[in-house]
Image (cartoon, rainbow, N blue to C red):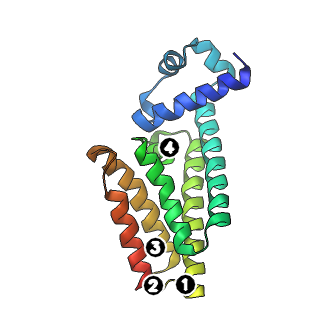
Amino acid sequence: MDMNDTATKLLDAAQVLVQNRGYNAFSYKDLATTVGIRTASIHYHFPAKVDLGKALMARYSDELEQSLDEIDRKGRTNGAKLKRFIGLYRATQERGAICLCGSLASDLNTLPAELQSDVTAYLDRSEAWVSEKIRDGIRSGEFSSSGTAASIASTLVAGLQGGLILSRTRGSSSTVLNHIERTVLAALKT
């Protein structure tokens, strides 16, 4: 097995474990069993669990940036861009998962400090992007709102994160994210 291929398989499996169990609820032994390698092989790629966590967050953050860039390129209106952003969460919901960052955030107080800052940066970036789209929409007249763009963005991201958790308890066909989308977009039209 190629070294890069092994690292990718480890990251893929670890992401599923974190999204399904949480960061603190799996061990390198669990990961080794899932991937079908020895625990020592994991330590070769990721000497400590924090190294694995940081690699997961780096990859997840890169994926977010790529997604946001694509949304910006393809979305004609700020409303369409926000719907596509919500679609990122809907895709996670359809897999029966919760956001990697949301799962890590639930363990935040027990995570190593350097991983805590990665989780916080991811959520801050998500909120900043949403806030920018809302501000752009207000400036262009597409949206009108009595709330601040930052507070609406924070509410949307928190709602989506929480919505994934609620959807897990209700099954992947839950309409929670649909309700969040309708509520936030309606609030921007008032």
Dot 4 or dot 3, earlier in sequence: 4
Residue 105, horizontal then vertical, whole percent = 46, 47
Distance from Cα at disc 1 to Cα at disc 3: 12 Å
**Label 4, on which residue?**
100
- Secondary structure at badge 1 equals helix
Q: Determine the residue positioned at 72% across, 21% down.
A: 3
Q: Are marks 1 and 4 in contact (CB under 8 Å)?
A: no
Check residue 152 in the rendering and tell me which mark sits there, or answer none. 3
Q: Does residue 135 lie above or below 154 as drawn? A: below
Q: Determine the residue positioned at 44% across, 43% down.
A: 103
Distance from Cα at disc 2 to Cα at disc 3: 9 Å
Q: Determine the residue positioned at 37% across, 70% down.
A: 182
Residue 106 visible in this rendered orientation of the protein: no
Check residue 138 in the rendering and tell me which mark sits there, or answer none. 1
Tell me the quarter of the picture where residue 98 sits. Answer: top left
Residue 86, horizontal then vertical, whole percent = 48, 60
